[in-house]
Image (cartoon, grey):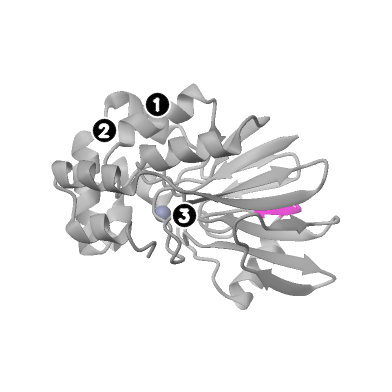
Amino acid sequence: MRFAVFSDIHANLSALDAALDAVGPVDGLWHLGDVVGYGPEPDEVVARLVERGAIGVQGNHDAAALGGPEIDWFNPDARRAMEWTRATISTTTREWLASLPRTMTIGSCFLVHGSPRDPTWEYVTSLPVARANFAVLGERIGLHGHTHLPLAWIEEDGAIEVVSPGHGSVLELRGRRVLANPGSIGQPRDGDTRASFMVVDTEADTISWHRTGYPITDVQGRMRAAGLPTNLVARLSHGQ
Ligand code: ZN
């Protein structure tokens, strides 16, 4: 079975649709939260995920969109975008976001936005943090987002190695444990402007990473029309 894993879509419908086209037929679509926030089309993104039967978890932006205290931790631009998101989203979107669990287990895979020990907030960006999270990860394959950086921590006999995958990278797990991040669909931050996602193949026991371009200037036009912060508009051109 092959599963597409998307994270941090951030209300960017053009990037989501480009990634859906690029991934082609799969046995399921999983998302790792931050479906909304920053971008101009929260309702449309949720509608597309519903249409495609996506399942997944709630991120810090999704929780903030529901009125949660998470907004208190946002920088000024993120806060302004979140206030816009709160005022814009439909009741249907609100109910769908509220229905998302913080964590989800599917077979040997554990889905979470931040980290296994702190589902909403923790960034898995260092070896000590990865090690601490392997200690609480009950499943073999941990899938998380939040950093917007494609990355994998692989554990074997207590030793942990890290890899930074690019477009077309294939990780052969061979039964090893992993904490894998697909990067971001809607707001990549690794200097590559293209939408980033993973495919988990449970039979081959592999994870592959993929990038796909999308019409960035169209999205930026919709962001400007919505009055979203100019810094958020500009960063899509830089992948930062
Ligand atoms: Zn995010």
Q: Residue at x 38, y 34 (%)?
A: 45
**In which quadrant of the rendered view does residue 151 lie?**
bottom right
Q: Is residue 141 magenta?
A: yes
Dot label at residue 47:
1
Dot label at residue 89:
2
Dot label at residue 120:
3
Q: Residue at x 50, y 65 (%)?
A: 123
| Mark 3 Cβ inside 8 Å of ligand 1 | no
Quadrant holding the C terminus: bottom left
200 horizontally vs 15: left or right:
right
167 horizontally vs 204: left or right:
left
Q: Which residues are magenta?
A: 138-142
**Rendered location of residue 98, percent (x, y):** 40, 34
48 horizontally vs 203: left or right:
left
Residue type indicated by callout 3: Thr
Dot label at residue 4:
none
> Which is more foreground, mark 1 or mark 3?
1
**Rendered location of residue 38, percent (x, y):** 29, 50
Tell which circle, 3 or 2, labels the residue nearer the N-terminal end.
Answer: 2
Q: Is residue 60 above or below residue 96?
A: below
105 horizontally vs 30: left or right:
right
Residue type indicated by callout 1: Ala
Using the numbered discs, state the Cα–Cα distance from disc 2 to disc 1 in whole angstroms. Answer: 11 Å
> Which is more foreground, mark 3 or mark 2?
2
Q: Residue at x 32, y 59 (%)?
A: 237
**In which quadrant of the rendered view does residue 204 lie?**
top right
